[in-house]
């Protein structure tokens, strides 16, 4: 018999709908039952592409004896962290405070009022790996709650106070009272990032290596600002090594989640929408900054993979692909030498050398394709033909599962990636993808006043979080910069204004993660660090600054400034944790360019898009609603460009060569 999760839309929750555990989704019914029966809550948080989440389900949640212990002693709640990042933030912070580390699957025991009592990550079904077995954990916690309840409740209240202080501490306290926001912050950040650079394999730190897209973006910007060759070297070596590694899907395009080793060979095989959005963008920017054709190819292959395998019929983007197929991690992606030879025939020898395919293999007696050889012009065309043959054969294998829920924040990230790739790679098909995606979100997840976070099986659910508003506004703004269609900018303004109304902290500065009308939880968090995805505060600051430049909105600029002031001290201490915030700061410090084009913009836009100019905003057409376009007429009936720098304008030009001179002079 299915449990209550059968009525959910999350693929992760539905995976658990036939467990013998009496699961609830998070909501009033479960919380009220815990209070009425005076039981602890067992909160289990994971996500569908999480390998160890599947392991714990198979070992424990499908085990009738363990499920019986859970059902007898606890009210059991299962949460998809991608649907409820608000809960994940709070209880992950709690587990990290309790144990010094975190991860998924996450298991937290709560009082009926939500205060955490004890927590951890993966628990095996019996004592092993130096971890206590899950049955022993269940029995120990339930016995303690029966025999030492007053002590446990008192400890939980004390821990709640610490947790609230941890999540709500005023970050301004870490800054000097007269903290200066200037280019010295960027210099210091580049030095801090450089101290962790791997000069052999690129990236930062050792194994496991996560793709540092936002950090590379900052390094490209820093080189553009200063001419620092080491910054450019750190960026390009990292882009080169990731593109050649096994973390990149050499056959089908797109990036896996991270590399388990220090040289990008063995990935954790799931593919996340957000990684591919961030990495497609940084490869586009790498191409713009260096004109290296490799970066253009990787960006296009990544976005083509998304269109082919991660795009829904309604034009939205799915969330993830699993690491496992047929219960085996990576099975879909790896090759044995005999199969490789059978597919490629006479060409297989050179190609096996190029992709490091051997009889003994490079991972568990199989081969993860990665580039170790040099490709001359003769081999180049054969490589592409080989990829197509390998892809056709691979398509006949059992595919990894796909989480088909649609998340507004991750769609916003991918929306910007497609809009910018359309602009800078001259791909009109990408424009169509971006516009269709924006229309879907506006018609399905935005009701004119608020955003919802998730869509699946025809149901839009959950209040939007800060990241939903910030990332979607960011994508809409990129779409305006691509098309100069005012409707996209107008939508971005509406979403941004609602974001300020719902999330801005008038007293402490910065944006809360949840809105004013959100469900009351244990605490209301703020997130400033750029981790696997950019923090909503980072994206919001960047969007506010660029929209302020277009619209002459001093209120937008002031709020972005307040975000910087609030976290300046943290940025000085932990620069490498603020990749996207540093990009926003780069724009803020300037010099930035504001370009208005009166009349048909095509010629001027073509010049602009052939350059790497990250601190530039552009408006085109005629609209009194856009301050940058006001009182900007065409001269002599010809399209005219007005180039302004830090709000001071040069003489308008109608000639493309003169326009390029103005850009270069800046």
Image (spheres, helix red, strand yellow):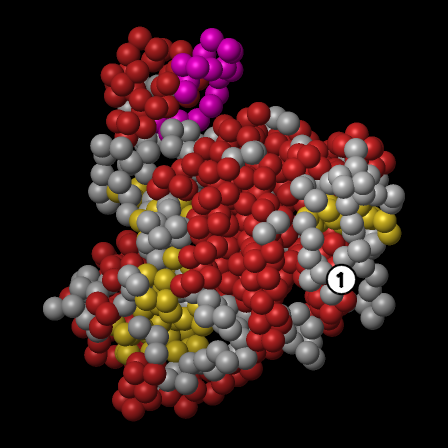
Instruction: Name above or below for residue 349 compared with residue 322.
Output: above
Q: Residue at x 51, y 63 (%)?
A: 468
Q: Residue at x 45, y 70 (%)?
A: 447
User: Residue 28 location, x and y as percent?
Assistant: 34, 83
Q: Nearer the viewer, residue 418 or 269?
A: 418
User: Residue 541 location, x and y as percent?
Assistant: 67, 61
Residue 397 is covered by the magenta coloring: no
User: Residue 453 location, x and y as percent?
Assistant: 44, 65
Question: Residue 469 falls in which quadrant of the image?
Answer: bottom right
Q: Nearer the viewer, residue 80 or 365?
A: 80
Question: Residue 626 falls in which quadrant of the image?
Answer: bottom right
Q: Is residue 590 left or right of residue 254?
A: right
Q: Residue at x 37, y 45 (%)?
A: 310
Residue 75 appearing in the image: yes
Q: Nearer the viewer, residue 488 or 574?
A: 488
Magenta segment, principal secondary structure? loop
Instruction: Name above or below for residue 388 compared with residue 522.
Output: above
- Where, quadrant-wise, is the N terminus in this rendering? bottom left
Q: Which residues are magenta?
A: 365-384
Q: Residue at x 42, y 48 (%)?
A: 272
Residue at the spot of label 1? 552
Question: Residue 499 falls in which quadrant of the image?
Answer: bottom right
Does dot 1 land on a helix, a strand or a loop? loop
- Where, quadrant-wise, is the C terminus in this rendering? top right
Query: Count of labels shown?
Result: 1
Q: Residue furthest front?
A: 637
User: Residue 407 location, x and y as percent?
Assistant: 42, 59
Instruction: Name above or below for residue 495 compared with residue 245.
Output: below
Residue 372 is covered by the magenta coloring: yes
Q: Nearer the viewer, residue 410 or 241?
A: 410
Residue 527 appearing in the image: no
């Amino acid at each position: 018999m299915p449990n209550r999760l059968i009525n959910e839309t999350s693929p992760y929750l539905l995976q658990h709908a036939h467990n013998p555990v009496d699961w609830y989704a998070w909501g009033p019914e479960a919380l009220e039952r815990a209070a009425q029966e005076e039981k602890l809550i067992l909160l289990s948080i994971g996500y569908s592409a999480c390998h160890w989440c599947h392991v714990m389900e198979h070992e424990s949640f499908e085990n009738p004896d363990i499920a019986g212990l859970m059902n007898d002693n606890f009210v059991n709640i299962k949460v998809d962290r991608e649907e409820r990042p608000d809960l994940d933030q709070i209880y992950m912070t709690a587990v990290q405070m309790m144990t010094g580390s975190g991860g998924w699957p996450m298991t937290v025991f709560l009082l009926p009022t939500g205060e955490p009592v004890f927590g951890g990550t993966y628990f095996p079904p019996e004592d092993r790996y130096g971890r206590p077995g899950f049955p022993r954990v269940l029995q120990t916690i339930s016995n303690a709650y029966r025999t030492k309840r007053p002590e446990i409740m008192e400890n939980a209240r004390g821990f709640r106070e610490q947790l609230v202080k941890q999540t709500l501490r005023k970050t301004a306290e870490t800054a000097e009272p007269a903290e200066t926001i200037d280019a010295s912050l960027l210099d210091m950040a580049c030095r801090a990032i450089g101290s962790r650079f791997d000069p052999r394999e690129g990236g930062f730190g050792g194994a496991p290596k996560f793709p540092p897209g936002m950090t590379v973006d900052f390094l490209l910007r820093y080189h553009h600002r200063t001419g620092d060759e080491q910054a450019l070297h750190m960026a390009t070596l990292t882009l080169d090594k990731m593109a050649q590694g096994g973390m990149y899907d050499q056959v089908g395009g797109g990036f896996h989640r991270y590399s388990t080793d220090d040289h990008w060979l063995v990935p954790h095989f799931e593919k996340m929408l957000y990684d591919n959005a961030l990495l497609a963008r940084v490869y586009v920017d790498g191409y713009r900054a260096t004109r290296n054709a490799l970066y253009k190819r990787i960006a296009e292959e990544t976005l083509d993979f998304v269109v082919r395998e991660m795009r829904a019929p309604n034009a939205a983007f799915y969330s993830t692909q699993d690491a496992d197929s047929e219960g085996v991690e990576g099975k879909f992606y790896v090759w044995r030498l005999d199969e490789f030879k059978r597919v490629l025939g006479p060409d297989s020898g050179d190609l096996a050398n190029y992709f490091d395919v051997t009889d003994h293999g490079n991972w568990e007696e199989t081969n993860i394709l990665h580039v170790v050889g040099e490709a001359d012009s003769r081999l180049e065309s054969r490589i592409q033909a080989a990829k197509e043959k390998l892809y056709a054969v691979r398509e006949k294998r059992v595919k990894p599962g796909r989480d088909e829920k649609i998340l507004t924040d991750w769609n916003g990230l991918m929306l910007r990636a497609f809009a910018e790739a359309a602009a800078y790679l001259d791909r009109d098909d990408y424009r169509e993808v971006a516009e269709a995606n924006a229309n879907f979100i506006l018609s399905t997840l935005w009701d004119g006043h608020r955003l919802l976070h998730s869509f699946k099986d025809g149901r839009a659910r959950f209040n939007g979080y800060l990241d939903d508003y910030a990332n979607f506004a960011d994508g809409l703004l990129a779409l305006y910069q691509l098309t100069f269609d005012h409707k996209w900018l107008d939508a971005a303004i509406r979403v941004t204004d609602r974001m300020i109304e719902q999330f801005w902290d008038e007293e402490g500065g910065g944006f809360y993660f949840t809105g004013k009308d959100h469900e009351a939880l244990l605490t209301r968090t703020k997130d400033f660090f750029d981790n696997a995805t950019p923090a909503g505060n980072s994206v919001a600051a960047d969007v506010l600054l660029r929209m302020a430049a277009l619209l002459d909105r001093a209120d937008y600029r002031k709020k972005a400034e307040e975000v910087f002031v609030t976290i300046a001290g943290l940025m000085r201490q932990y620069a490498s944790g603020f990749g996207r915030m540093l990009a926003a700061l780069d724009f803020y410090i300037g010099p930035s360019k504001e370009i208005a084009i009166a009349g048909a913009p095509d010629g001027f836009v073509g010049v602009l898009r052939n350059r790497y100019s990250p601190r530039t905003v552009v408006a085109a057409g005629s609209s009194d609603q856009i301050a940058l376009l006001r009182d900007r007429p065409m001269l002599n009936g010809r399209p005219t460009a007005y180039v302004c720098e830090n709000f001071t304008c040069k003489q308008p030009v109608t000639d493309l060569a003169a326009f390029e001179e103005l850009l270069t002079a800046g």
